[in-house]
Image (tube, rainbow, N blue to C red):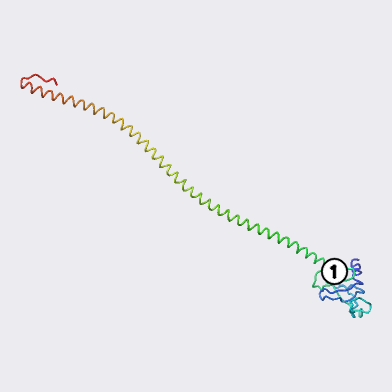
Amino acid sequence: MAESSQENLLVNKFLISLVDGKIIGYVTGITVEVQHDKFYFILKVKALENIGKTGEFHPGMFSTEKKIKISPEDIVSVGSDAIIIGGGKVPPVKEIERLVQVASEYSMLAKELEEKEKLLQELKAENLSLSKQVSELERELKRYQVLKEDFEHLKEQLIKQEGQLEMAREYIKLLEGLRHDIDAIKANVEKLTTGYVEEVVRNIVNEELNARGLKKTLL
């Protein structure tokens, strides 16, 4: 049924070669030939000759009849007045339309890809900037780490010095206490020494006075 319907569509129409760019003739009949698993159309075509200068169609312009064998793949398009064939070199109209649609989709995808590529470049630039910032922060972190280590070292030194200072203060307090004791001992020694010297001097004077028969000194 499908082949019979397709046969009727191909009768009483002009046959045009898209590859050669000319009218081959007028289809008056059609038969189907099957070879292996494929079928072909055998078109009875009246050749187009004796075309007038005006280009108008008339009965005398058709002369001899010939047969042309085509496959369904050769048919590019079938209209109300003409059959366009491409000789296997031109895809069918539906295929062309599909290719046009594919080309349109490809164009859209290419545009999206271009936009995504642009976005990717922007992200790469941003990533490079962030990488530089991270590197700078890492250098700052290392510098702060060194400063922290120096601070901890100074802190230990300060604690050590504070301990030594506290010991020095305690030692000074001890020395001050000893100084008071030494001053007291010195005062006692001086007092004892002074009293002893006075006693010795008094005894010497008294002995001298006694020797001379004088009174004892009141020293």
In the image, residue 154 above or below residue 34: above
Looking at the image, which residue is at 85% across and 69% down?
77
Quadrant of the image occupied by residue 94? bottom right
Quadrant of the image occupied by residue 26? bottom right
Residue farthest toward the top in the current orientation of the protein: 215
- Residue 20: horizontal and vertical position, in percent? 82, 76
The residue beneath circle 1 is 77
In the image, residue 219 above or below residue 12: above
- Residue 42: horizontal and vertical position, in percent? 88, 74
The front one of 174 and 120 is: 120
Disc 1 marks which amino acid?
Answer: Ser
Quadrant of the image occupied by residue 56? bottom right
- Residue 31: horizontal and vertical position, in percent? 91, 73
Q: How many marks?
A: 1
- Residue 2: horizontal and vertical position, in percent? 89, 66
Residue farthest toward the left in the current orientation of the protein: 212
User: Is residue 37 visible in this depiction of the protein?
Assistant: no
User: Is residue 77 visible in this depiction of the protein?
Assistant: yes
Q: Quadrant of the N terminus?
A: bottom right
| Left or right: 152 in relation to 56 | left
Q: Quadrant of the C terminus?
A: top left
Residue farthest toward the right in the current orientation of the protein: 59
| Left or right: 205 in relation to 159 | left
The front one of 152 and 39 is: 152
**Secondary structure of the residue carrying numbered label 1:** strand
Q: How many residues crowd mark 1 within 10 Å: few (<14), some (14–19), many (20+)?
A: some
